[in-house]
Image: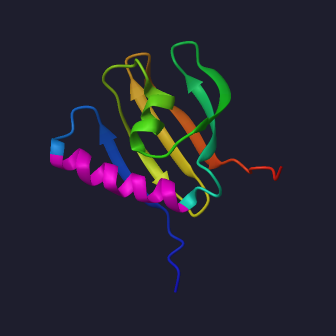
Amino acid sequence: MINNMPKEREFATYMEEYEYEEFRDFLDGEIERIAKTGFQFRIEGRNMGWRKREGYKETEIRNTGDLFHAIANGIGDFSGRITVYNDRLEMSLSHHDAPTGEFYTITPKEVENE
């Protein structure tokens, strides 16, 4: 039987090293599992920064480091929660410019055959 329940994990820049390693191993496996072909993803964000912007970007994400670089590059300290579904990741991210949270949906991008 396949477990269709979403999995949630909390994260923060101030995690202990062993906590981050466990989180990274978990998320690396989930990124690999939901990646369709290649590792091209679409990240849709809303409530971003102090201006509450929204938008999207398409980028390659192969691991946890790539994901945080795409979303939280240059933010400094942050914390949040990631929820893993069968076909996507959903993330809330709080930091000094968005204390109530930014929200992201990360889905694998369909790759066109050439």
* Residue 10 seen from this side: yes
Relative height, residue 91 to residue 108 (above, below)? above
Q: Nearer the viewer, residue 92 or 107?
A: 107
22 left or right, relative to 9: left
Residue drawn at x 49%, y 30% is 71
Residue 21 place in picture, x, y as percent: 24, 49
In the image, farthest residue toward the bottom: 1
Residue 82 place in picture, x, y as percent: 44, 47
In the image, farthest residue toward the top: 51
In the image, farthest residue toward the right: 114
**Magenta residues, dominant SS class:** helix
Relative height, residue 42 to residue 51 (above, below)? below
Residue drawn at x 58%, y 13% is 51
Over which residues does the magenta segment extend? 18-33
Residue drawn at x 80%, y 50% is 112
Residue 91 place in picture, x, y as percent: 49, 42
In the image, farthest residue toward the front: 114
Q: Within the image, what quadrant is residue 45 found in? A: top right
Q: What is the number of callouts on the image? A: 0
Residue drawn at x 60%, y 43% is 105
Residue 35 place in picture, x, y as percent: 58, 55
The answer to whether residue 22 is magenta is yes
* Residue 101 seen from this side: no
The answer to whether residue 85 is magenta is no
